[in-house]
Amino acid sequence: MTSSNAPFLEKAAYVDAVRILQDTEPLPPVEPQPALRPPTPPRTTASTTASIDLDSIGEAEARKIVSEEHRALGYRPSDGSLAAQAQSAAARHPEGSLIPPNEKALTEAAEADAVRVAGELGGQPSYKMQHITVPGKARQLSAAETLGIDLRGVGRNEANQIMSEEHSELGYRPPAGSLAAEAQAAAAHHPQGEPGVEHPDPISLVEAAREDAQRVAAEREPDTVPCINLHTVTKQEAQLLESLEHKFLGYTPPSGSLAAQAQAAVARRGAQPVTKELAAFLYSEEHRTLGYEPPSDNIAVIAQSLADQNAADGGARTLADAGV
């Protein structure tokens, strides 16, 4: 038994596995500020200049960084540069990771480190670096800063409210860099909020969470939305999704994964007797997606047959009875 989902199962399982790995990355801890003296700015290094996880760098990514940093500097990057660190990392794991940084991120990181290297060597940035922002003089605002949310006043209750609202808007767990992730990290440091700091009002939090959800959704790559219709996915397809996603993740897909959602959808649908209305809905969904009449082994055709039998004899046959 099949559905229109069949051609997309492997891609959908892979994309969702990537999403899970991204969404379960540990959040950076919120560092407490010294109580009696102002913080001392850390020395700028390749790792602080560039927001690149060296554990995700393979040979292909290292070559890209070396090329871009060499181009920006006008000479081969020295020891201690991001390019040198990337090559060292790639030697340890040539294939990189399942979630490599995109080319834009690699280019921006290489260019930013080139400015740092040129400055430390006492040279002037070349004409190739005039468009690059010098590290330390400007930085990208966090989601909370952009939305006007003071994280010092965010405790566990506020963080949970933001997470719930943004999760609901997105339909998946907000990723690192989202307002929800920043709020969770802040609340871990001060569960009741910092003493003496006013808590953000609930309406502002809801509005900020929704606005940030729109930003996250807009920045998300187009191919990260699994093209699986949970209304029509079959039992066999749900089982294959679970197997594929297990293979990509290296462990059983968690609750909230596409595989778990597919299994739950099949279970819910299998508990209901097939009616004419359900059969018509499934047929409409499959016909719309396929662009032609569903074949005889399609879930929609099987549902029509069961609905006809139930209508004829008052039975309560389900798709689960047919193994779909």
Image (tube, rainbow, N blue to C red):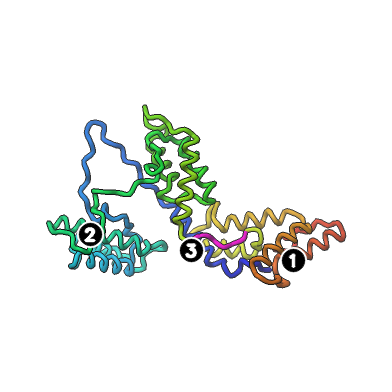
At horizontal 62% and vertical 60% (from top left) the residue drawn is 229
Q: Tally the marks.
A: 3
Q: Decide: is 184 above or below 251.
A: above
Q: Which residue is mark 1?
A: 302
**Residue range (magenta):** 224-229
Q: Which residue is mark 2?
A: 130
Q: Quadrant of residue 126?
A: bottom left
- Is 226 within the magenta? yes
Judging from the image, what secondary structure is the residue with disc 2 in?
Answer: loop
Q: Which residue is mark 3?
A: 248
Point out residue 144 in the picture as x, y percentages from the top left corner: 39, 42
**Three-letter amino acid code at disc 2?**
Gln
Q: Decide: is 245 above or below 35.
A: below
| In this view, the mark in front (2 or 1) | 2
Q: Earlier in the sequence, mark 1 or mark 3?
A: 3
Point out residue 128 in the picture as x, y percentages from the top left corner: 22, 64
Q: Are marks 2 and 1 in contact (CB under 8 Å)?
A: no
Q: Residue lying furthest right in this view?
A: 313
